Image (cartoon, rainbow, N blue to C red):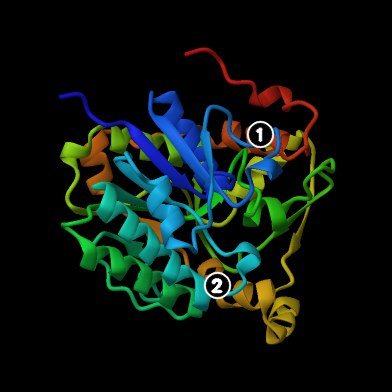
Amino acid sequence: MERNRTALVLGATGGIGGGIASALLRHGWRVRGMVRDIAKLTPASPAGIEWINGDAMRRDDVVRAAQGVSVIVHAVNPAGYRNWDTLVLPMIDNTIAAARTAGARVVLPGTIYNFDPAATPVIGEDSLQRPKSRKGLIRVALEERLRQAAPEVPALILRAGDYFGPGARSSWFAQAMVSPGKPLRRIVDPARGPGHSWAYLPDLAETFARLLDAPERLRSFEVLQFEGVCDHDGRQMVDAIRRAAGRPLRVFAFPWWLIRIAGLFGGFPREAAEIAPYWRHPVRLDNARLEALLGAEPGTPLDVAVTETLMALGCLDRPARLLIPQAA
């Protein structure tokens, strides 16, 4: 019997959702995307997706959109970091209900916010989840919903560090370290200590697609870690940006003190202040189980990945000559 290779991607207009959708399309999947208003789609939206009107907060919409799919990618988040406490869990409940009806697997891009970075320097599939932030507590509850639904509703969680890359617009790289649409003049460095974990979005999306190409190898509740770029001393990303620019750039410290003050009023500053410990304490993701399934983790050389990211953000007209990769 031919395998059903149709996926519904919730959040396909976002960075990680769009990246996964594009990777699945390259792998020969049929991809469906649900948006609140198809008329508002832009030319930048991933091509080749079958778009359906619907709202992730309305269960009937999600169930209808999921008819006939074998995978539901849950990559939808509340806009602007607002209303996490009232929106995140109802949305995953709707996705689980739709997956149960369709007989589909739920796929979730996981985060490191489920853990206390001071106590968990290496995150594996069995690491104890003791988050310190409100967002982290909600992420733990979200994943527990998936655990409880398995094996009736199988799930795949692939955890990764901070995103960067073409399409990763809502990221620390794009929103803090550089200024999109402007030539590189300086770097703002959020690091407050040694080390940080990054995930190059095209590599992460490719990993999702490869895993879903062989679902028979996955457990009914599979939790994997994507190691990505482990900036072991907190200087690798800054130095790669400098090499991409091809000239010296001044580095300024991120104003965490200002974020803490602004966080008293809620919104994004409050969320940012709560995740400051992840920039102080290095965390590495143990990808042993992932490599057992796939072999080597997809990995673009850092200089190439950073150059492509900066070009996509409009910060470079062309890559520095020294970064042009040589043919293998």
Return the residue nearer the eye: 93 or 163.
93
Residue 30 position, x and y percent, is 41, 29
Using residue 310 as the reference point, say whether residue 159 is left or right of it: left
Instruction: Residue at 32% x, 73% y: name it.
Output: 129
Residue 18 at x, y = what percent?
54, 41
Q: Quadrant of residue 266?
A: bottom right
The tally of labels here is 2
Q: Taking 17 as reference, is 187 left or right?
A: right
**Residue designated by label 1:** 307
Q: Is residue 93 left or right of residue 254?
A: left
CA gap, disc 2 and disc 1 = 27 Å
First-in-chain label (2 vs 1): 2
* Labelled disc at residue 38: none
Within-10-Å neighbours for mark 2: few <14, some 14–19, many 20+: some
Q: Would you say the residues marked 2 and 1 are in contact, meaning their CB atoms lie under 8 Å apart?
A: no
- Can residue 126 be seen? no
Residue 155 appears at what percent x and percent y? 27, 53
The residue carrying mark 2 is 275
Q: Residue furthest bottom?
A: 264
Judge whether 169 appears above or below 110 on screen.
above
Query: Residue drawn 42% across and 77% down?
Result: 137
What amino acid type is highlighted by mark number 1? Thr
